[in-house]
Image (cartoon, rainbow, N blue to C red):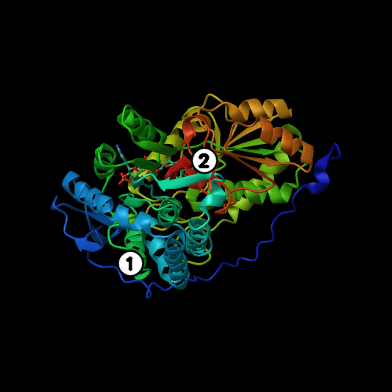
Amino acid sequence: MPDDPSYLQPAPLPSFGLEYAAAPESTAIVSIAERYQLFIGGQWVEPRSERWFTTTNPATEEPLAEVAEAGADDVDRAVTAARGALAQWSAWSGRDRAKVLYRVARVLQERAREFAVLETIDGGKPIKESRDVDIPLAAAHFFYYAGWADKLGYAFPGRRTRPVGVAGQIIPWNFPLLMASWKLAPALATGNTVVLKPAETTPLTALLLAEVLQEAGLPDGVVNVVTGAGETGAALVAHPGIDKIAFTGSTEVGKHIQRELAGRDTRLTLELGGKAANIVFEDAAIDQAVEGVVNGIYFNQGHVCCAGSRLLVQEPVAELFLDKLKRRLDTLRVGDPLDKNTDVGAINSRAQLDKITELVAAGVAEGAEMYQPQCALPEKGWFHRPTVFTNVALSHRIAREEIFGPVLSVLTFRTAEEAVTKANNTPYGLSAGVWTEKGSRILWMADHLKAGVVWANTFNQFDPTSPFGGYKESGFGREGGRHGLEPYVELDDLVAT
Ligand code: NAP
Ligand code: MG
């Protein structure tokens, strides 16, 4: 790197006054019912609670449908159905379970556009992400775990596997179908039965998935879907008939669940929050790193547990990097999530927008410097401009708390040791990114970063074969890969014959 990197200074962007024409995805493929009942024992049933809630399109604030709110009685009914189906399902051969899972994967592929549009309408994420990331990865998870279903003896050599039993699975709203697939596929491959609780703001794709599971020939009661809010999740955790809880959500609720389960014979895995560092060294390919940082924090409006929400950039390239980053931000298209050109869609809920707005105000009040592109936002719906904070101190709330929105906090560093100290200075430990051309430095950093996943010269890459999970307050247990089977099996020793 020469002393003066001015030859790399960006030239001003040409301005032709051209704008992208709107390219909205048609919603004709999706039909949304007025009301959704609970899916229990293979049937659609009225909630005994007699309560309903509304799910909304966050991009328009329009109500989409009424959804049943499962009370404790309903949760009990679902757990009973799952318990009733366990003996039959776990007695199926691995090959037969695999056939069903392969069918689920194929139907997800066949109905991919329908799922993508529905995911975007209910949750606000850009259609290009639900179409190219969420739905293909959801199908890939079913394919992958279908492959393990008849090979569990190879996953755990010398051991015999038994299912854990009835799993209660609670998922958040940021990747609704994908999180459901991460949880269901390994549980079903290993012969467990499930009660699934989707998030309150995004229940629709999980309910459509229930239809797909039936179409694929999953026996009644093997998967039950209880919609509702936090109370429904709490009722599931409190139910004594549950053998395992798998939870993805906030660290606060995760800690509460862990306390609830203390002293009970219920297995637990927690996938919680994060405050990941994306670390750019001076020898990094700067333009690629800018793209990686943008993808790391503005993908899915920053509603990503492993989002690269803290940028650590090495001092010699900090100014250049921030110049390029801001220019790139100016070109992000914020708006209608159904528009195929949209990069940043709607914030998932009014409550989440309020939380982001409050933390951004705290950043300004604490003395950090804010940059936002002056793009126009839609008049209706919940939107937030992509935001960068510079002059951030480690003590600032925006450097410590998970914002879960399109907000990046920038810090600088001089040496690799300092970068590691700053990156690890957080209660979280879910992910990190390292940008450098030196392989040895990547390995050294990966060794020293306390994070479940360390991406090198890339970010936010997911694959069903690769385990994912946290350190410290980001939780415990792994999802994905062979590791993702472990939470769902009891292992017995094989007696040598
Ligand atoms: P959340 O409030 O913890 O909610 C997660 C799920 O738990 C939702 O289904 C929620 O229901 C339910 N819930 C709420 N209170 C509960 C209780 N007392 N007992 C049982 N269940 C309860 O989190 P969120 O705001 O939806 O999601 C954002 C968080 O998830 C972020 O912190 C993010 O980092 C984390 N996350 C982590 C990962 C990971 O893999 N580590 C992945 C994605 C997200 P309602 O939505 O209906 O209230
Ligand atoms: Mg919604």
Residue at 83%, 47% in the rendered image? 7
x and y percent of residue 48 in the render? Answer: 13, 52
Q: Badge 2 local density, few (<14 within 10 Å), some, or many (20+)? A: many
* Callout 2 touching callout 1 (CB < 8 Å): no
Q: Nearer the viewer, residue 384 or 119?
A: 119
Quarter assignment of residue 359: top left
> Who is closer to the viewer here, 64 or 261?
261
Mark 1 near ligand 1 (CB under 8 Å)? no
| Res 216 quadrant in image | bottom left
Q: Specify whether residue 224 is in view.
A: yes
Quadrant containing ligand 1 reads top left
Q: In this view of the protein, which residue sits in the foreground, 213 or 339?
A: 213
What residue is shown at x 46% (from left), y 56% (from top)? Answer: 345
Q: Could you tell me the amino acid type at mark 2? A: Gly
Q: Residue at x 22, y 47 (%)?
A: 75
Q: Which residue is mark 1?
A: 214
Q: Residues within 10 Å of mark 1 (few under 14, many from 20)?
A: some
Label 1 sits on a secondary structure element that is helix
Q: Which residue is mark 2?
A: 469
Q: Point out residue 276 in the picture as x, y percentages from the top left corner.
A: 56, 37
* SS at badge 2: loop
- Report whether 298 appears left or right of 262: right
Seen from the viewer's position, the closer of residues 255 and 43 is 43
Which one is in front in this view, the residue at disc 2 or the one at disc 1?
A: 1
Quadrant (top left/top right/bottom left/bottom right) for the N terminus: top right
**Mark 2 residue CB less than 8 A from any atom of ligand 1:** yes
Report the amino acid beneath label 1.
Answer: Gln
Residue 265 sits above or below residue 288 on the image? above
